[in-house]
Image (cartoon, rainbow, N blue to C red):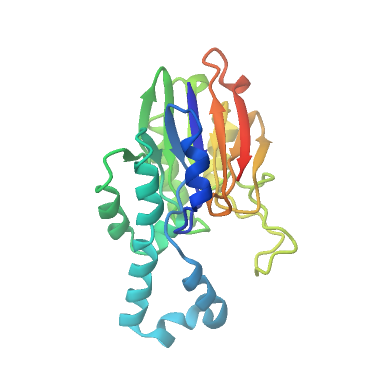
Amino acid sequence: MKFLLIGDFSGQFSKELEISLSKEKFDAVLCTGDFADMREISKLFKTYGNKLGKVLGKEKNEEIKIEAITKAKIPLEKLNSLGKPIYTVRGNNEYNSKLNVFLKITKDYKNIKLVDFKKVKINGITIIGFPAFSAIEDKKELKNSYEKFTKIIKNIEKTIILSHIPPYNCEFDKIPEKAKNFNAGKHVGYKTVEKIVEKYEFPLLICGHLEEYQGICYKDKTKVINPGAAEQNKYAILEINKNNLRDSKIVFKKV
């Protein structure tokens, strides 16, 4: 069994990516979220910071958020057209810009299933989804999300975690020092995901969020896989070893 691993679209889905995926063989898709295009909002936030809402006014602020989330339709439509089951979690882009609008949009695509705090079984392999909230979680979210997640855990060695945000303090959650970001050099993963990984030692965790990364790292005994940003024409193919998920084969692609 093979999975296409993909995510971090930011409203984009290039023709080159579409052609490349049409040539791949896979049974289902595991998607790490971030469909909405937050680039305009991010640009404005860098200029105005927390004063953005006051500067734009309520009506204009709402208009920009709706526009950002509506662009999620571009990658969602392309993924849906692959004709394969698609399991996804929401990214922080979806949370920040009108979550209810995003949830309504996803219902228009029959092949796409949102697995936020849900589990789905595929040929004996369980997928459990861990969605993003804000880019940085707070204590209340940490407690609530941990409780929701741990209630549905079963058969750890046959389970893959699908999370938008990587575990805290791993190779894939550190904003590069050279990044033009006030958090440059800091670890921005979720401590909840770190806590889950440390306690349960799942074999595989699929994540995204920071577009600078593509590859494999380890958090304790868990293999953490970042397929790369689809916005940059990156993805990965995961070939499952049902006898031992930890030995599954992963191939990274860049178009």
Residue at image coords 64%, 44%: 214
Provide residue 253's location: percent of width, then percent of height: 61, 39
Provide residue 231's location: percent of width, then percent of height: 54, 54
Relative vertical location of residue 94 with respect to residue 40 in this rendering, above or below: above
Which corner quadrant of the image does residue 36 belong to?
A: bottom left
197, 213: nearer the viewer: 213
Numbered circles on residues, count: 0
Along the horizontal axis of the image, is 127 left or right of 229? Answer: left
Relative vertical location of residue 1 with respect to residue 176 in this rendering, above or below: above
Residue at image coords 28%, 45%: 109
192, 188: nearer the viewer: 188
Which corner quadrant of the image does residue 56 belong to?
A: bottom left
**Residue ranking furthest to the right:** 177
Relative vertical location of residue 92 with respect to residue 153 in this rendering, above or below: below
Residue at image coords 58%, 53%: 232
Along the horizontal axis of the image, is 142 left or right of 178? Answer: left
Residue at image coords 50%, 34%: 23
Provide residue 207's location: percent of width, then percent of height: 54, 42
Q: Quadrant of the C terminus?
A: top right
Relative vertical location of residue 22 with respect to residue 180 in this rendering, above or below: above
Provide residue 24's location: percent of width, then percent of height: 51, 32
Along the horizontal axis of the image, is 221 left or right of 202? Answer: right
